[in-house]
Amino acid sequence: MKLTRRMTMAAFAAVLAASSAIPAYAVDLIAIITPSHDNPFFKAEAVGAEAKAKELGYETLVLVHDDDANKQSQLIDTAIGRGAKAIILDNAGSEASIAAVQKAKDAGVPSFLIDREINATGVAVSQIVSNNYQGAQLGAEEFVKLMGESGNYVELLGRESDLNAGIRSKGYHDVIDEYPEMKMVAQQSANWSQTEAYAKMETILQANPDIKGVISGNDTMAMGAIAALQAAGRKDVIVVGFDGSNDVRDSIKSGGIKATVLQPAYAQAQMAVQQAHEYITTGKKPVEEKQLMDCVLITSENADQLETFALTN
């Protein structure tokens, strides 16, 4: 499914700045539903969405579905029952979430998706996601450079039900596979989990002690991988992540993880709330349902500018 509109971070900032001219409307409720806030990326989404909603005069209902499609469906029932005017949703699966978003639409509650798209159009009002393919290519290009274009490496994949996991992996391989001396010796899913990534990395390292690098589908798994590598005394292994978390920023600055790819979770969530507000108050829909936000490579050169999934300068 092709995403048809690309937006730079600067364009998003301009739209958000212009929103201050829009009058606030009190009493109405916006529901914000994301995966667990144990992952700082999802917490940043919730914080950004809630801040924007309150700025515009809305009450908020912040809920967590823990990547459980059944729980997500129940939470959407809760939002509908509470009379929410809109739902901001980082969904629990590209296929499994379609019915829940359709249920909200049928109840007259519009959904505005962030971070993860669903395999359907015309069900949500908007789907604002990071340009995962573009970002993955940025990360892969830096990874190849750091690896000196050769060596054994490991890939940690995200949750299989998440379209982003597959898109990022494809972006990685469309770059890395062009280098014949780069050899992937293991590829395993750690389901976006730091704990699982730590355990998987321990096992992989035992079977492949000569690995030179690890490329990860997100920062949380990258943090698990680097912890396992450091515990094994392998500080020489190159690790690259994806998200732009403060934890990985700090690791980059201290010489641990070498790079990550920033996807602006906070701005993305705020943009969804802005679009929800315009839809609630005027009936206006975005020109395109599917909207892409470009990603930015983060290395030691610009890590100081990274704060809560946004560049400060």
Image (tube, grey):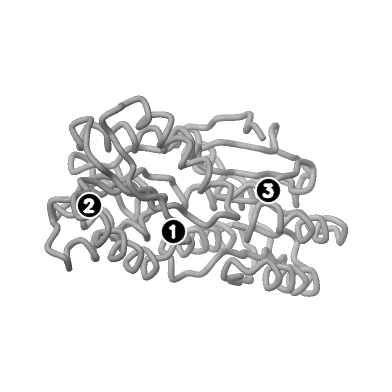
Residue 60's disc number: none
Point out the image quarter for the C terminus.
Answer: top left
SS under mark 1: helix
Q: Secondary structure at mark 3?
A: loop
Q: Circle 1: is it few (<14), some (14-19), or many (20+) Cα within 10 Å?
A: many
Q: Residue at x 76, y 57 (%)?
A: 101
Label 2 crowd bin: few (<14), some (14–19), many (20+), radius 10 Å: many
Between 262 and 268, the one nearer to me in the picture: 262
Which quadrant would the N terminus be assigned to in this image? Answer: top right
The residue beneath circle 1 is 41
Q: Which residue lies under the disc numbered 3?
A: 118
Residue drawn at point x = 62 percent, y = 65 percent: 33
User: Above or below — where is 17 with respect to 79?
Assistant: above
> Which of 124 and 186 lies nearest the eye of the viewer?
186
In the image shown, does 152 or 197 lie closer to the viewer?
A: 152
| Marks 3,2: beta carbons within 8 A | no
Foreground residue among 120 and 114: 120
